[in-house]
Image (cartoon, helix red, strand yellow):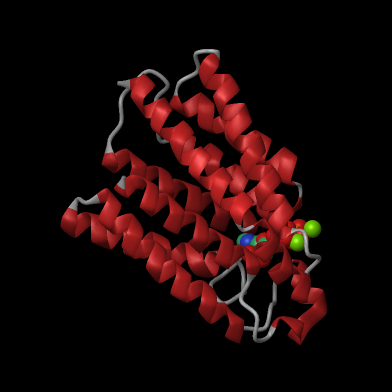
């Protein structure tokens, strides 16, 4: 039922929060090479704010759609920065897949992930090869849909997609940044993966692990 869906969303957000906190320093160090070094803090603050807002909303009786909307607003606000705005929009778009009062299953979970990624692409306007999180998110999206279509296995599809996203994120090391803050520093990013692409793949891998339990 709808309360169970809300509970699953809260657990998923808690996984993202714990994962971002665990990798805060690593994400920050990565962003410091060619960017401004705040990506670890942005992800930690964003996920923490999203989880807190989601818990508040759920406690006040909100359903899945509203919980994710509130979480998305809080993520953007608490994180600041480009990636925070994009992740915030992603959560809000993911929420639009759900009904406050209805149940949901694996199909909706896949649709929510896809809607979130589509929002990132729409709002950020980055193309593949621009050295952004889109370079990890689009391969994730493609693999998730293909795997889920053949297996109907949400856990397996998410794990496979996260593994593909991780490889794609690491491959961004070979790209010179054209978009995002690091563009002003040009070739400095060569040899280093995009922080937002890497954090995306790390968070999705954690989500896959969580779903498996
Ligand atoms: P800021 O760049 O404002 O300091 P962060 O350091 O938190 O924000 O996030 C940087 C990440 O944001 C980049 O590594 C990249 O993945 C992502 N990013 C930046 N611009 C875009 C964009 N237009 N579309 C998608 N992702 C983007
Ligand atoms: Mg930054
Ligand atoms: Mg910044």
124 lies above or below 177: above
The residue lying at 61 percent from left, 58 percent from top is: 23
Q: Quadrant of residue 213?
A: top left
Any part of residue 70 in sight: no
Task: Give the position of the N terminus as an image quadrant.
Answer: top left
Which residue shows up at 61% across the image and 36% down it?
50
Front residue of this view, candidates 133 and 9: 9
Q: Residue furthest top?
A: 60
Q: Residue 117 placed where, x, y %?
A: 49, 53
The image position of residue 140, as x and y in percent, is 41, 63
94 relative to 149 in the view: left or right: right
Q: Nearer the viewer, residue 92 or 4?
A: 4
Residue 108 location in percent, x, y? Answer: 33, 39
- Provide residue 47's location: percent of width, then percent of height: 62, 43
Ligand 1, what quadrant?
bottom right
Residue 111 in which image quadrant? top left
* Residue 198 seen by the camera: yes
For image coordinates 72% across by 63% down, the residue present is 28
Q: Is 34 left or right of 132, judged from the image as shown?
A: right
Residue at image x 77%, y 70%?
32
Residue 114 vs residue 16, the one in the foreground: 16
In the displayed structure, 5 sits above or below 90; it is above
**Quarter of the figure with residue 55:** top right
- Labels in figure, total: 0
């Amino acid at each position: 039922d709808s309360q169970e869906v809300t509970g699953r969303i809260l657990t998923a957000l808690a996984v993202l929060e714990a994962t971002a906190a665990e990798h805060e320093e690593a994400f920050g160090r990565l962003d410091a090479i060619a960017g401004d070094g705040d990506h670890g803090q942005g992800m930690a603050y964003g996920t923490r704010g999203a989880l807190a807002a989601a818990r508040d909303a759920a406690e006040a009786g909100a359903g899945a759609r509203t919980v994710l909307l509130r979480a998305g607003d809080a993520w953007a606000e608490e994180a600041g920065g480009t990636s925070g705005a994009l992740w915030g929009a992603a959560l809000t778009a993911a929420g639009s897949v759900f009904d406050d009062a209805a149940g949901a299953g694996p199909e909706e979970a896949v649709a929510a992930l896809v809607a979130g990624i589509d929002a990132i692409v729409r709002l950020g306007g980055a193309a593949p090869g621009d050295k952004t999180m889109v370079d990890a998110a689009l391969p994730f999206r493609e693999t998730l849909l293909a795997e889920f279509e053949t297996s109907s296995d949400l856990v397996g599809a998410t794990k496979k997609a996260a593994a593909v996203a991780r490889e794609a994120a690491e491959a961004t090391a070979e790209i010179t940044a054209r978009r995002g803050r690091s563009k002003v520093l040009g070739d400095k990013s060569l040899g280093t993966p995009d922080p937002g692409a890497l954090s995306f793949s790390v968070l999705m891998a954690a989500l896959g692990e969580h779903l498996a339990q």
